[in-house]
Amino acid sequence: MAGNMSTSAAPLTSSLAKLQSLHGLFAVYKKPGPTSADVLNALKEALLKEAGVENSNPRKRKKQMLKMGHGGTLDSAASGVLVVGVGNGTKMLSTMLTGSKKYVAVAELGKATDTLDATGSVVLEKGFEHITRSDVEEKLRSFTGDIMQVPPLYSALKTQGQRLSVLLKQGHKVEAKPARPVKVYGLTLQDFQPPLFTLDIECGGGFYVRSLVDDLGKALSSCAHVKELTRTKQGPFTLQEHALHQHQWTLEHIRRSLQPCSDGDHLDQQRST
């Protein structure tokens, strides 16, 4: 009987050992809706299930079995590249927070919301008929380069250990964080079909597309909010080439796409040329 137990346990031990031997970075696709933490947890569930670990295990135990983290929160309504660190790769995630990112944002003129995106309540409506394509392109120049930006109230930023977004949803009064320096490498108007317009954005760490669109709306003597947001690149990982979709959340797919970490290993986080 002991021999049978040992034999049946062997595949589990082998699969889990292979999973725990992974060290590095890879990217997954986050669809609109779930939080970045939800995506990470679903990814862990899928991998541990493949390794034969029961789904009923407490989350804490799963965390001990599989060390994993993500390199920068995407808003729940946003989609696109979410960089994941596994094993010792979690130590490399800080480079993702400061590295270059690219976004495509569809924004709507004439309406401002409390969250600065389509998930919130409309708090202001203003006319936008006076705004032309050239007006938008001209204003975009002032938002390029090294600029100061006030982060949104509804964000993952914390005050006294609590996320601002959570405090607001609980009915607490929250003060805006002070303006901080951010870098915008590139800002292009891709499409202009009022009230909608589409921006291509390349920025550094700590930048909020929602704040940009809100500020842009004000600069145009109107208001605006983000309707759709997609992160198309983070560091060296692009949406088209690297992001694994949910059906690809397997040990084999991750092993193939993993950028391993080792002593002296350095991923280029500078702006691509």
Image (cartoon, rainbow, N blue to C red):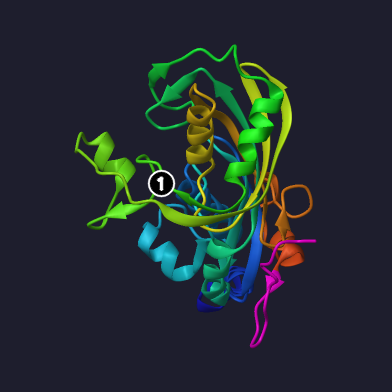
For label 1, the residue is 150
Question: Which residue does the image show at 53% across and 62% down from the upper left?
Answer: 97
The foreground one among 233 and 66 is 233
Q: Is residue 33 visible?
A: no
Q: Is residue 36 magenta?
A: no
Could you tell whether 201 is left or right of 49 in the image? right
Q: Does 81 sit above or below residue 7?
A: above
Residue pushed farthest bottom?
Answer: 263
Question: Which residue does the image show at 51% across and 65% down from the upper left?
Answer: 68
Q: Secondary structure of the magenta portion, mostly?
A: loop
The foreground one among 183 and 220 is 220
Residue 221 place in picture, x, y as percent? 50, 23
Secondary-structure class at tag 1: loop
Q: Amino acid at mark 1?
A: Val
Quarter containing the C terminus: bottom right
Q: Is residue 265 magenta?
A: yes
> In the image, which residues are magenta?
259-273
Q: Is residue 231 visible?
A: yes
Residue 61 place in picture, x, y as percent? 39, 65
Question: Which residue does the image show at 64% across and 88% down from the upper left?
Answer: 263
Residue 33 place in picture, x, y as percent? 51, 35
Could you tell whether 167 is left or right of 127 in the image? left
